[in-house]
Image: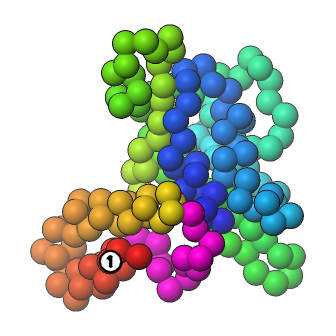
Amino acid sequence: VLEGHCQFAMARFPEKTQPNKLDALARSALWRNGLDYNHGTSHGVGAFLNVHESPPSISSRISSENAPSLTPGMILSNEPGYYEDGEFGIRIENLVLVKECEKLNQRSTMIKKFYEFETISLVPFQKGLIDIGLLSNTSRNWVNKYHKRCLEIVGPKVKEKNPDAFLWLQKQCEEM
């Protein structure tokens, strides 16, 4: 589940990409093991205080080619999961912001603009629940960078309010 979460978070895609075309990024690690989940991978969050807000919706359901594409400024969830009926469930959810991919858009030969996600929820993953052996090196590096951002952005505020909580945050954000 975390591998799929990371792959979705690291996505780079050309403008006018239909949202559902990104769904396989979050599911592919589970699919390689004969697993899947029954819910959508992502939905819009937003402007009218609705939790599941249109237009963006990313799932394995068939999407119309006329569905609105993702555009900079949209906020979506990133929430792959896996459930064993009657046994347990795993879901990891963060919010991501669609933004222009400056690194790719700087190339003068680009025909289309490219977009990417910026994860805007800044809470570290519970490292005691992560099986590092199931993560690719790319995903492990992404998690380490994400944890570093959590500590850099949230850490000073936590340290000021609660030094004990800051120690916990530092421990959770240590490199894997």
Which kind of residue does numbered mark 1 sit on? Glu
Front in this rendered view, residue 137 or 42? 137
> Which percent across, then down, holds residue 116?
47, 36
In the image, what residue occupies the spot 43% across and 12% down? 109
Residue 174 in percent (x, y) is at 32, 77
**174 part of magenta stretch:** no
Q: Which of 174 and 70 is in front in this view?
A: 174
| Residue at screen point 75% across, 67% down | 82
Q: Which residue lies furthest to the bottom in this view?
A: 164
Asked if residue 151 is positioned above or below residue 102 in the image, the reply reads below
Q: Whole-percent x and y of residue 119?
A: 43, 50
Q: Quadrant of the C terminus?
A: bottom left
Q: Give the range drawn in magenta.
A: 123-136
In the displayed structure image, the side of residue 144 where residue 151 appears, left or right:
left
The quadrant of the picture occupied by the N terminus is: bottom right
Q: In this view, does 171 lie to the left or right of 83?
A: left
Tag 1 residue: 174
Residue shown at the point (27%, 79%) measured from the top left: 170
